[in-house]
């Protein structure tokens, strides 16, 4: 009677054999698994090791294809390559969307910019999303890409220039411990 481990290995081999004609359909699954792995990491990895991993996996997969290696090895390397590319793509996206965050100001500061959007009115007035051009006391590289401000009276139309005084606060933290930040 085969051991439990032998039965599991046999079952996995059978499942892989059934999917061998559909290996291309597993590429996005592996890519997504790489992205999910990136977001599950406890610390933020630097970009270069992820790029090296993706290049090495791509090279190994390409070499296996050129040398007409066993189909199972080639497919496994293709899945590892897709997962490594998913890791690198997730890190690249994180880098692209990173933006400065305004720190709390001691008092009102002058903000000049363009109105991007007007939110429905809240309890305290109209909320406008501003693409700031200049914020008093902040260097251009420290200026956030977007700010949300509450204005009294009639809100300016999207696309119009705006100049106002406001007290800056960073975005609030997660609503619950360990929640989305």
Image: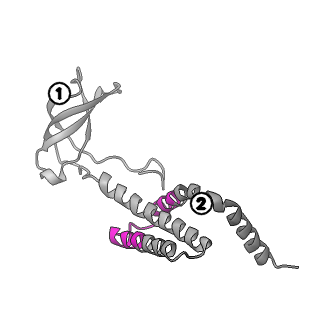
Compute the Cα span from label 1 to label 2.
52 Å
Please tell me whether residue 177 is drawn above or below residue 135 in the rendered image: below
Please provide percent x and percent y for residue 12. Answer: 71, 68
Q: Dot 2: what SS?
A: helix
Q: Is residue 87 left or right of residue 106?
A: right
Quadrant location of the N terminus in the rendered image: bottom right
Please tell me whether residue 102 is drawn above or below residue 92 in the rendered image: above
- The circle on residue 23 is 2
Q: Dot 1: what SS?
A: loop
Q: Nearer the viewer, residue 179 or 79?
A: 79
Q: Is residue 90 left or right of residue 98?
A: right
Q: Nearer the viewer, residue 7 or 67?
A: 67
Please provide percent x and percent y for residue 56. Answer: 42, 74
- The circle on residue 160 is 1
Q: Nearer the viewer, mark 1 or mark 2?
A: 2
- The circle on residue 128 is none
Q: Is residue 83 left or right of residue 94?
A: right
Magenta run includes residue 96: no
Residue 108 appears in view = no
Question: Where does the magenta region start and end?
Answer: 31-55
Q: Residues within 10 Å of mark 1 (few under 14, many from 20)?
A: few
Please provide percent x and percent y for residue 112. Answer: 13, 37
């Amino acid at each position: 009677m085969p051991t439990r481990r032998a039965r599991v290995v046999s079952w996995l081999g059978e499942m892989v054999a059934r999917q061998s004609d559909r290996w291309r359909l597993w590429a996005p699954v592996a890519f997504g698994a790489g992205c999910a792995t990136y977001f599950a990491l406890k610390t933020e990895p630097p970009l270069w090791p992820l790029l090296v991993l993706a290049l090495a996996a791509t090279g190994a997969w390409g070499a296996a294809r050129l040398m007409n290696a066993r189909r199972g090895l080639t497919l496994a390397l293709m899945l590892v390559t897709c997962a490594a590319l998913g890791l690198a793509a997730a890190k690249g996206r994180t880098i692209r969307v990173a933006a400065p965050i305004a720190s709390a100001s001691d008092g009102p500061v002058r903000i000049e910019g363009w109105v991007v959007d007007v939110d429905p009115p809240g309890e305290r007035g109209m909320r406008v999303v501003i693409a700031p051009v200049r914020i008093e006391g902040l260097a251009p590289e420290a200026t956030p890409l977007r700010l949300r401000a509450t204005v009294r009276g009639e809100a300016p139309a999207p696309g119009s220039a705006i100049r106002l005084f406001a007290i800056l606060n960073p975005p609030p933290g997660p609503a619950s411990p360990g929640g989305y930040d």
